[in-house]
Image (cartoon, rainbow, N blue to C red):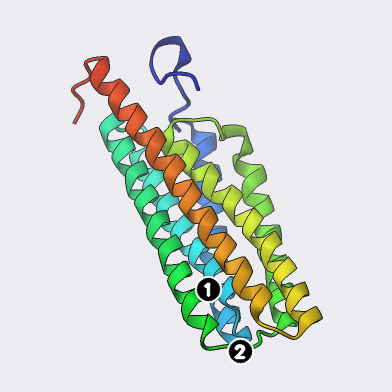
Amino acid sequence: MPGCCGHDAKFEGVSDDYKRRLWIVIALNATMFVVEMAAGHLANSQALQADALDFAGDALTYGISLAVIGASIRARTNAALFKGVSLLLMGLWVFGSTVYRVFYVGVPTAEIMGAVGFLALLTNLASVLLLVRYKDGDANVRSVWLCSRNDAIGNVAVMFAALGVWGTASGWPDLIVATVMAGLFLSSAYQIVRQALAERRQMIEHGHVET
């Protein structure tokens, strides 16, 4: 992976076009959090609720990303570290609540899961298309891309879960998908934190004293 200094400098988000795209994606994520959380409760779906939580986390972290664009390396890596830890906590929450649901078995409503999952997938595909041009930036920018990618993958998984629930009349496909999504949160958290710490080390090695 290229370094963050010199000729291999990564895109840091300082672009009006990138900022406009982020505002659109924030609005999409905030809207889908409300829709999907309500649908998750209505359908008794852990996978939908996990995906809704991801939407909420994304809306928050995209706002943080906007706030630190153009700031010092220290500020941007701090923001990326915060987002990485947030993803870690979300993953642990989903794991824990899924384990709880194993002992509180209820069959989700497959039709609601499928319909809302499809709507969320369209929303996230739009976000991915808006951001794909900027997927290889610094830790702050890359964390935005990883969150959007996670959402699209998560929505495909929710639709498979809905199909599994419908075909088996069991809640297990929903719980399995929720667990997979939790693992995806943890994997992305690791990637974001690792890149942020690497950029922090490079800052120190090159003698930057930004605060």
Closer to the camera, 75 or 69?
A: 75
Residue occupying the point 46% across, 37% down: 141
Mark 2: secondary structure: loop
Closer to the camera, 14 or 175?
A: 175
Place residue 113 in its image quadrant. Answer: bottom right
Residue 34's label in the rendered image is 1
Residue occupying the point 63% across, 84% down: 43
Residue 16 placement, left or right of 69:
right
Residue 155 can be seen in this image:
yes
Residue 124 placement, left or right of 9:
right
Q: Residue 1 in the image: state x and y as whole percent.
A: 50, 22
Residue topped by disc 2: 106
Q: Label 2: few (<14), some or many (≥20) within 10 Å?
A: few
User: Which numbered disc flags the more N-terminal residue, 2 or 1?
Assistant: 1
Residue occupying the point 58% across, 52% down: 150
Furthest residue in direction front, as rendered: 103
Q: Quadrant where the C terminus lies? A: top left
Q: Tally the numbered discs.
A: 2
Residue 94 placement, left or right of 172:
left
Eyeballing the image, is 20 above or below 203? below
Q: Residue 15 in the image: state x and y as whole percent.
A: 48, 31
Closer to the camera, 163 or 140?
A: 163
Residue 72 can be seen in this image:
no
Callout 1 amino acid? Val
Q: Residue 176 in the image: state x and y as whole percent.
A: 62, 69
Place residue 109 in its image quadrant. Answer: bottom right
Callout 2 amino acid? Gly
Furthest residue in direction right, as rendered: 167
Residue occupying the point 43% across, 29% down: 12
